[in-house]
Image (cartoon, rainbow, N blue to C red):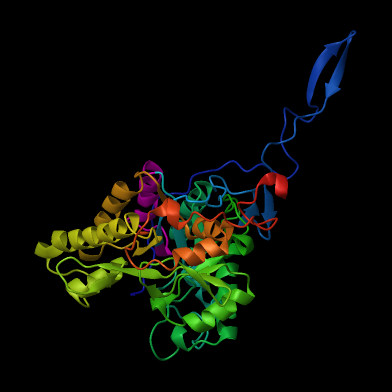
């Protein structure tokens, strides 16, 4: 996986009304009504939405996330939905405006996604030395830093994405790969330090940019952050140990076949998957970068005459992987992307066409990783174990009704999917 490029300027941040902690009403004296010749004061109505600023006001608690569905446990004999996860590494808004574009695509196709934010995209260049990467000198980053306009644009997209039900994960900070201080060489303690810094840059972007009057991100990142993908898919073992200690719920830094997820070291392993690669005898990781490397090699802008073909190969490979699961074992399809215009933007076109074709199908749910693991946590472990016995593309021989006929055990109290009366 290559590092995403430095963020450039984009759209200006839009103003959002923030309700102060004290609330707002019809005026300091409230609403008055006439009664027996005198005015009688009525209390001002309580605000419907209260914002509790956190720290310097870069983030805020605004209540439960909108559009976050409540997971339900499968009924006996019920066919699982077909989950599809579209995720974005190093998510940020630059002059290409791909973040805002795919937010629009998601809304139009009943989809939510996961955006893995690189923390240094909220750190201005002049404050670069605030970043102290493990095994590197202060201020070092293989993907650069940002400017005020780029930070404003990225914050706007993160804010709107979360309000639309999308997940904000992390792609950490400096994106160091390979030998000589790459993430694959980091200890558990170094991973914890990197995660702490990623959180801090999100919690202090107002202080670091001087944009004190800008609206906050509408979530507490300490609670919002429950999963990640490591740079170049390296360093996974020590990262997972650190993530487990920090209360993360999943990791998607591995490579797997299209089978049902299981837990590893206390975290859901929702690895990216191998899918068919049209025109080739081998399968391909479901990520734009990997298609590119196997098509144009080390260059990100290969032969323009082949751009359309290369995009079609990625689109058709993802669609074949989808159909294999949809008609087979119903294993969630995990797809990774970058906001990049590699090979003329052909992979962005391919991803958009896949979203449009699959997310509106019956029994398909295009969701974030958080929504997927919410659903997994709501299921009977015996049901999930049975689902994991199905191989790639393998549908139950006697049909789903027979395969999952056994009544699942009741969910423990407090687990997602538990009936309200049992809580």
Q: Read off the magenta span.
A: 88-109
Is 381 placed left or right of 25 in the picture?
Answer: left
Q: Residue furthest bottom?
A: 180
| Residue 149 seen in render | no
Residue 265, given in percent of the width and then of the height, sits at 56, 78
Residue 371, given in percent of the width and then of the height, sits at 51, 55
| Rendered residue at 49%/79% (across/down) | 139
In the image, residue 174 above or below residue 286: below
Viewer-nearest residue: 312 or 120: 312
**The image quarter in which residue 46 lies:** top right
Viewer-nearest residue: 202 or 83: 83
In the image, residue 258 above or below residue 413: below
Image mark count: 0
**The image quarter in which residue 175 lies:** bottom left
Residue 335, given in percent of the width and then of the height, sits at 36, 63
Residue 212, given in percent of the width and then of the height, sits at 60, 55
In the image, residue 340 above or below residue 419: below
- Does 93 lie within the magenta span? yes
């Amino acid at each position: 996986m290559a590092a995403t490029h430095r963020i450039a300027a984009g759209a200006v941040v839009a103003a959002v009304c923030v309700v102060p902690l004290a609330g707002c009403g019809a005026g300091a004296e409230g609403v008055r009504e006439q009664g027996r010749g005198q005015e009688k004061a009525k209390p001002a109505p309580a605000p419907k939405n209260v914002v509790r600023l956190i720290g310097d006001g870069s983030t805020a608690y605004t209540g439960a996330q909108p559009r976050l569905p409540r997971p339900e446990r499968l009924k006996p004999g019920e066919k699982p939905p077909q989950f599809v996860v579209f995720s974005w590494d190093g998510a940020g808004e630059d002059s290409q405006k791909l973040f805002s574009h795919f937010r629009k695509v998601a809304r139009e196709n009943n989809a939510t996604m996961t955006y893995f934010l690189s923390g240094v995209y909220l750190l201005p260049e002049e404050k670069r030395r605030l970043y102290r990467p493990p095994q590197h000198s202060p201020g070092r980053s293989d993907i650069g830093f940002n400017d005020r306009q780029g930070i404003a644009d990225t914050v706007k997209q993160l804010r709107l994405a979360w309000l639309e039900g999308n997940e904000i994960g992390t792609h950490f900070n400096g994106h160091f790969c390979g030998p000589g201080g790459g993430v694959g060489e980091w200890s558990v303690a170094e991973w914890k330090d990197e995660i702490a810094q990623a959180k801090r840059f999100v919690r202090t972007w107002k202080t670091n940019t001087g944009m004190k009057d800008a609206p906050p991100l509408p979530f507490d990142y300490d609670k919002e952050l429950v999963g990640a993908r490591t740079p170049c898919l390296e360093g996974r073992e020590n990262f997972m140990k650190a993530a487990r200690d920090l209360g993360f719920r999943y990791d998607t830094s591995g490579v797997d076949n299209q089978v049902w997820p299981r837990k590893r070291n206390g975290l859901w392993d929702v690895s990216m998957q191998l899918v068919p690669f049209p025109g080739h005898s081998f399968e391909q990781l479901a990520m734009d970068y990997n298609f590119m490397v196997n098509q144009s090699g080390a260059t990100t802008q290969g032969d323009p005459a082949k751009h359309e073909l290369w995009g079609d190969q990625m689109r058709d490979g993802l669609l074949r992987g989808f159909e294999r699961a949809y008609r087979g074992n119903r294993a969630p399809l995990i797809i990774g992307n970058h906001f990049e215009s590699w090979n003329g933007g052909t992979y962005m076109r391919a991803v958009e066409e896949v979203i449009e074709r699959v997310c509106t199908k019956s029994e398909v749910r295009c969701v974030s990783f958080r929504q997927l693991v919410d659903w997994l946590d709501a299921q009977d472990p015996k049901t999930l174990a049975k689902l994991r016995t199905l191989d790639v593309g393998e549908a139950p021989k006697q049909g789903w009704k027979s395969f999952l006929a056994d009544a699942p055990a009741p969910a423990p109290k407090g687990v997602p999917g538990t009936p309200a009366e049992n809580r």
